[in-house]
Image (cartoon, helix red, strand yellow):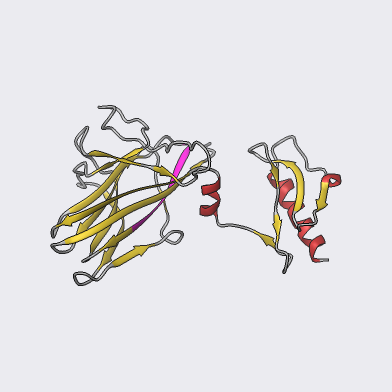
Amino acid sequence: MNKILALLLVLSLLLSGCVAGTVADPAHVDLASDDRVIIQGQTNEGNDRVPLVDTISNALVDVSITHSQVHTEISFLSYFVDETLAAGDNITLAFKTPGRDIRIHLFVQFVTLVGGDIQVWEDVTWSTGGGTLNPISNRFRETTTRPSVLLEDLTATPSFTTTDNTLMNPGINTTGATSLHHIYTWGAKNKLLAGSARDTEEIVLKPNTLYGVTFTSGADANKAQLILNWYELTVVVE
C-alpha cells in the first residue's frame, strides 16, 4: 500500500513537471526489483525521471536543492588563502553578475587563525583591470565541466567577460555600496575559528551588478581563507 501511495505521488509530481506537450504514460510505470519507481516521462532536460524509494520506509528519497545543483554542473566555488595577514589587512574576492535571466545563489565560508570579519558588498566599484585572477572550480568533476557565468574585467579591459575567474584584491570602493551580510569572528592567536552557512545564509544576487566579499583581519600574525560557494540558476523573466 505504501508503494502504491508513493507511486501516485510521483505520478502527480511528474505530470505537473513534464515538458509542455508531453504526458507521462501510466502504462510505462513499473516498480523495479530494486525499489526504484521507473517513470518514462520526459523532463526539461530530455531525460527520464528515476525517483528512488527507500527500501525500509518506502518513502521517496530526495536531496537538497544545493546538492542537486552539483549534479547538474551549475555549482561552483572560488577561494583564496593568505598566511601573512596583519591587523586590518583584507582578502577580497570580487565579480560582476551576468544578465537578467540568471541568478547567482551565493553563500560564504571562512577560516581564520586570530579573528576578523566578513562583509558581502553590493554595488561596489574598483579600478578597471585591478586585482589578480582567482580561479573558479565547478563542483561536478566527472566530465568536462561547464564554466561559471560570473564576469571579471582584468582580461577584457574595459568590458566584463566570463573567464572562469573571480578577481582577488582589486581594491574595491564601498562608498555608496550596500552591506548585505556582516559576519564577525573573535578568538585568540593559534585558536582556529571557522564559519559557514549554506542554506540559511544564502543570498540571491541581483543581475548586472558588481559584488565584493571581503575578509578583514582582526589582529597581526593572522592566517585566513575566504571561500565563495554558489550555484547559477536560469529563471524565466517576464
The residue shown at (82%, 51%) is 30
Q: Quadrant of residue 185?
A: bottom left
The residue shown at (75%, 42%) is 41
Would residue 54 be found to the left or right of residue 88 on screen? right
User: x, y percentage for residue 148?
Assistant: 42, 38
The residue shown at (32%, 31%) is 160
Residue 14 lies in the magenta-colored region: no
What secondary structure is the magenta-colored segment mainly?
A: strand
Please provide the residue range marked out in magenta: 101-109
Q: Residue furthest right?
A: 27
Q: Residue furthest front?
A: 142
The residue shown at (43%, 59%) is 198
Image quarter where the N terminus lies is bottom right
User: x, y percentage for residue 7?
Assistant: 78, 56
User: x, y percentage for residue 37?
Assistant: 76, 53
User: x, y percentage for residue 16?
Assistant: 71, 47
Would residue 103 be found to the left or right of residue 52 on screen? left
